[in-house]
Amino acid sequence: MPNETPRASRPAPSEPPASAGVPSPIRVVHWRADGAETWTGEAALARLPAALAAPAARTWIDLAGAPPELVGQVAAVLGLHPLVAEDVVERNQRPKLELTDGLVHVVLFGLLYAGETHLSEVDIVLGSQFLLSVHDADWEPEAVVGLRRGPERLLATGLDLLLWALVDGIVDGYFPVLDRLEDELDALQDDVVDQPTRWTLARLFVIKRELIAIRRAILPAREVLNQLTNRQLEAIAPEHVLYFRDVYDHLIRVTDELDTDRELVSSTLEVYLSTISNQLSAIMKRLTGVTVILAGIGGLAGLFGMSEAGPALAGAELPGFWFVTGAIAALALVTAVVLRRIDWI
């Protein structure tokens, strides 16, 4: 069993102390049969050529939020094909798997949630003696379940298992984000039924847009895992293909949940529009009821106002006026009671 070395290993004498609270953008884990070492900062870049030249050794180079210049330097040391190096430096790709000069280049997207979803591109290049991972600083490979006890045990078994651990961590990270979106959708559905607002509609459209972006990142990943499980790749041992098939099954579940969530958003939007339409119909009914009452009052008052009721039903104007006024009020009250019974007001 190789010696496991924690992330914060003792720096080499030539490595300058890192600034407090500022993690190094480069970390190298170098495994040999007699043990493993972890380097960061300038010492990692300086020792990398010798580490790659060591026979029967395996090296993991992890770049987290590294500047393009550092990524280019590492790509030059690894001898990556110019097209692969360009893709890794630019980091503006879609999920894919490419084979170039015996190297396996995998591009996937991690999914993060902080009030809103965020996609983080992860580039992984697998060679015979090294594995390079390039990602933003907000995605942490240390949080991957397979790496919590350290990458050394995976490196001792094979670099392809380290690739599996990273891919598995990316795919498993989709589930908690989708669960949060589903919980928010449940709350929005309750709001739509109880008291829909413009904020509810705006949030529904935001979730719909996020689900579309997630779908655009996840669907091509199915083809990536399909190739990892069905193509014969020299960098992946046949006995380890089963691990990638398990990840492929997880990704199928993710896409099923994603399709369900998209249907929930569409149905919730339909319920929202129906609720607003029903509220508008109720308001129109009430306005119609009020109009009926006011129209009756206005019609009778206008009739007697124009003719003076001859004058006021041949009686004194004052008693006739009060009689007509009382009749109008009684008729309006009866109309209001009838409209109330039929739920128009």
Image (cartoon, grey):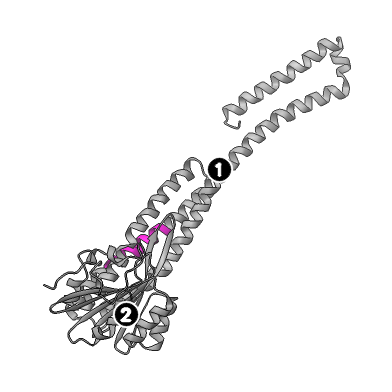
Q: Nearer the viewer, residue 117 or 308?
A: 117
Magenta stretch: includes residue 36: no
- Image position, residue 319 (x, y; %): 81, 10
Q: Please, what secondary structure does the residue beneath circle 1 have? A: helix
Amino acid on which the number 1 mark rests in the picture = Asn
- Image position, residue 26 (x, y; %): 33, 74
Q: Please, what secondary structure does the residue beneath circle 2 have? A: helix
Q: Residues within 10 Å of mark 1 (few under 14, many from 20)?
A: few
Q: Left or right: 172 with respect to 35?
A: right
Q: Nearer the viewer, residue 34 or 321?
A: 34
- Residue depicted at x 42% and y 46%: 187
Where on the picture, by quarter, is residue 318?
Answer: top right
- Residue depicted at x 31% and y 63%: 253
Where on the picture, by quarter, is residue 92?
Answer: bottom left
Which region is colored magenta? 248-262
Picture disc at residue 278 = 1
Q: Left or right: 158 with respect to 95?
A: left
Q: Residues within 10 Å of mark 2 (few under 14, many from 20)?
A: some
Amino acid on which the number 2 mark rests in the picture = Leu
Residue 320 seen by the camera: yes
Q: Earlier in the sequence, mark 1 or mark 2?
A: 2
Picture disc at residue 242 = none
Q: Left or right: 134 with respect to 344?
A: left
**Residue at label 2?**
45
- Residue depicted at x 78% and y 28%: 299
Q: CA distance from mark 1 to mark 2?
A: 66 Å
Q: Nearer the viewer, residue 166 or 138?
A: 138
- Image position, residue 75 (x, y; %): 36, 83
Q: Is residue 108 above or below residue 322?
A: below
Q: Main SS of the magenta segment?
A: helix
Q: Is residue 193 above or below residue 227?
A: above
Viewport quadrant of the N terminus:
bottom left
